[in-house]
Image (tube, rainbow, N blue to C red):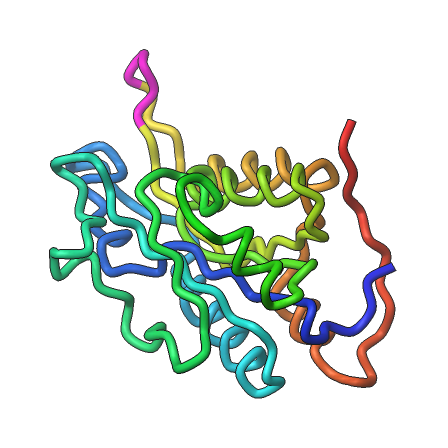
Amino acid sequence: MIRQFGPETGLLLIDVQKGVNVFDHWGGGSTGRRNNPEAEDRMRALLNAWRAGDLPVIFTRHDSREAASPLKLHLPTGAMIDGFEAQDGEIIIEKDVNSAFVGTDLELRLRQHGITRLVVAGFFTNFCVETSVRMAGNMGYDTYLAHDACATCNRIGPDGTDYDPQVLHDISVANMHGEFCTALETGTLLGLVGADAPALERVQGNE
């Protein structure tokens, strides 16, 4: 059962950087587009709730190895989206691959802070979010995905098919839910912050 979120529950916000909205890079040139325009508002609601509850907050910042990527920390597009600047005491993880755990000290920082449960949101659902969620689940963290606080862009397949971003998002969530995490709506997760939070069923496990 999922019970109220306490200090063992960290909010992990993945790559909430201005460059995620450079759609012509991510989505395949002129066809570039994104799903879920409400994702940032839902992430802000989660962030505000975690801060109000004095719960741990973790941000990742992506500093891409790819020459053409807008997610480079020395570029203006590498900056955090307005309203997602870290505050004193919050954890910042800089990474250069999809997973928040590879080549970083994230696991060590989580252990130091006694964090055993993660609520994950951010960009992109099928890239850095999914890779990080898969690893978190495999590493034994009690992992929850705020699926309506994530978003992705369309992708062009090897045969030229232009895959709709909502379809990619939905399939990615379906891949994660029940195997690597429990996917819940933001409103449900917000309801778990507080002393009178109801118990909900946890749906996740590994084959």
Determine if the magenta segment contains residue 10: no
- Residue 156, percent across and down? 30, 25
**Which corner quadrant holds the C terminus?**
top right
Quadrant of res 115: bottom right
Of residue 74 and residue 39, the one placed in the foreground of this image is 74
Left or right: residue 14 compared with residue 142? left
Left or right: residue 34 compared with residue 36? left
Left or right: residue 82 compared with residue 74? right
| Picture residue at 12% right of the left edge, 36% below the top | 67
Classify 74 as above or below 46: above
Residue stretch rendered in magenta on the structure: 156-160
**What is the total number of numbered labels drawn onto the structure image?**
0
For the stretch drawn in magenta, the main secondary structure is loop
Quadrant of res 76: bottom left
Determine if the magenta segment contains residue 158: yes
Residue extending furthest top?
A: 159
**Which corner quadrant holds the N terminus?**
bottom right
| Picture residue at 85% right of the left edge, 74% below the top | 198
Of residue 61 and residue 68, the one placed in the foreground of this image is 61
- Residue 99, percent across and down? 45, 41
| Picture residue at 57% right of the left edge, 87% below the top | 52
| Picture residue at 34% right of the left edge, 54% below the top | 94
- Residue 38, percent across and down? 43, 65
Classify 22 as above or below 56: above
- Residue 2, percent across and down? 82, 62
Classify 22 as above or below 103: below
Left or right: residue 10 compared with residue 92? right
